[in-house]
Image (cartoon, rainbow, N blue to C red):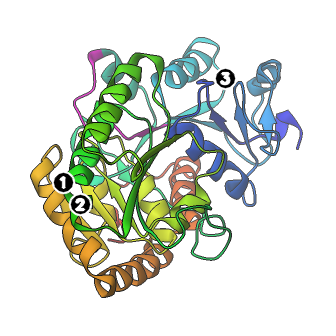
Amino acid sequence: MKPSETEVVAPNFKRRLSGVTSTVVQLVPLQARALRIAALGPGLPDHLPKLRFADLRHFWRRPPGRPFRIWHARRNIEMLPGILLRDGLRMPLKLVFTSAAQRRHTGWTRFLIRRMDAVIATSGRSAAFLDRPATIILHGIDLDRFGPAGPIAEGFPGRLVVGCSGRIRPQKGTDLFVAAMIELLPDFPDWVAVATGRATPDHAGFLAELKAKVAAAGLSERILFPGEVADVVPWFRRFDLYVAPPRNEGFGLTPLEAMASGTPVVASDAGAFTELVRDGVTGRVVPAGDGEALTAAIRPFLADDALRARAGKAALADMQARFPLQREADEIRAVYERLWSNLPAKSASSISTTR
C-alpha cells in the first residue's frame, strides 16, 4: 500500500509496551483486511503496516475514494498532532479518540477531546466520565492466540496454580493478591501462586516488601515472582484460577486473556471488569481494594474442582460469543464509516455493547 492510499492512521507515540500499544498491535493487522490502515510511531513490530513520519507529506491530498483520512488517537500525545495536522496544516483529516480512563479527565485532556470528530469509550464506566457523547466499544481478544489449546508453561508438576499478571505495583493490587495467598495457601497444600510481571525501579522496594512478607510466612516456595515472561499465553493456559486485583485500571485485558484460555477469574470491580466477568458464572467480582472480599471470593475456587471447571467452561464460551477481536474491529470500522458518510455518531446511551 502506498502512503498516499492510506485512509486510516493509527498513531502510537509511546515506545514502552502498554495496553494501548498492545491494542494497536493486535487490531491493525485485522483492520487491514478491510481498510487501508497503517500504524505510525516508534518501536512497532515489523509485521504491522506502517507509515514513516515523512509520509505525512502525502496527507494534503485526499485518499482514493474517501473524502478525508481518519486519525485514530488513543493518547493525548496522539490527539495533539492530529489537531495540528487538521487545523494547523489544513490536511483533510477527521479525528477519532478512544478513551479508557475511569476518572474525570484533566482540563487539557478535555480540551483535546472537545476537538475530536468522534469519541469511543472502552466501557460504560469510561463513557460516564466524558463530557460528550461516545460510542461504547469493549475490547475484544485474539481467540487465535489465546485459547485452551496449545503449549502451557512448564513447572509445578502435580500442583494447581493461581495466577496474577501485570506490573508489580500498588495500583495493580499485587499486595492484595499476596496477602490473600498468604492467608489461603496453608489451607490448600496442592496450590501454588504465581505473580508474573516486572517491578519498575521505582517499585523495586514494593516488590522487596512483598517477598519479605512471603518469606516470613514460610511460603517462598509456593508464592513465586518469576518476573516478566517472554510469552504470557502459555501461563494463562497453565493457571487453574486467575486473579485480577487492581485498585484502579483503564480497561484491563488480562481477565479476557485468562477467560479465553478457559480459566475462571476473580477480579476487582476496577476497569471494565464488571462488564467482562459475569459474576457467579465465569468468576467473581469484588470491590476494588477490599482484601477480605478478594480472599473470600478466591477460597471456593481453590476448594472446588467442579466449580472451577464450570466457570472455566462458561468463561471460554462467553469470550467466544461476546469478545472476539473481529467484533471490536467491526464496531470501530462502523464509527469510521459514519464519519465518512457524514452520519451523526451514536451516543453511549444508544449503542449496543453486546452485554
Q: Residue at x 52, y 60 (%)?
A: 328
Give the mark nearest the N terminus, 3 or 1: 3
Instruction: Pick the residue in front: 122 or 264.
Output: 264
- Residue 105 in the image, given as x and y percentages of width and height: 27, 26
Q: Residues within 10 Å of mark 2 (few under 14, many from 20)?
A: some
Q: Residues within 10 Å of mark 3 (few under 14, many from 20)?
A: many
Quadrant (top left/top right/bottom left/bottom right) for the N terminus: top right
- Residue 20 in the image, given as x and y percentages of width and height: 52, 38
Q: Residue at x 56, y 50 (%)?
A: 336
Describe residue 26's horizontal placement relative to residue 172 as left or right. Answer: right
Give the mark nearest the N terminus, 3 or 2: 3
Instruction: Pick the residue in front: 2 or 287.
Output: 287
Instruction: Pick the residue in front: 119 or 140.
Output: 140
Q: Do tag 3 and tag 2 residues touch (Cβ < 8 Å)?
A: no
Q: Which residue is mark 3?
A: 91
- Mark 3 belongs to which amino acid? Met
Residue 186 shows which numbered tag? 2
Vertical placement of 26 versus 198: above or below? below
- Magenta segment range? 97-107
- Mark 1 belongs to which amino acid? Glu
Describe residue 158's horizontal placement relative to residue 291 as left or right. Answer: right
Indicate the secondary structure of the residue bearing disc 3: loop
- Residue 188 in the image, given as x and y percentages of width and height: 27, 68
Q: Which residue is mark 1?
A: 183
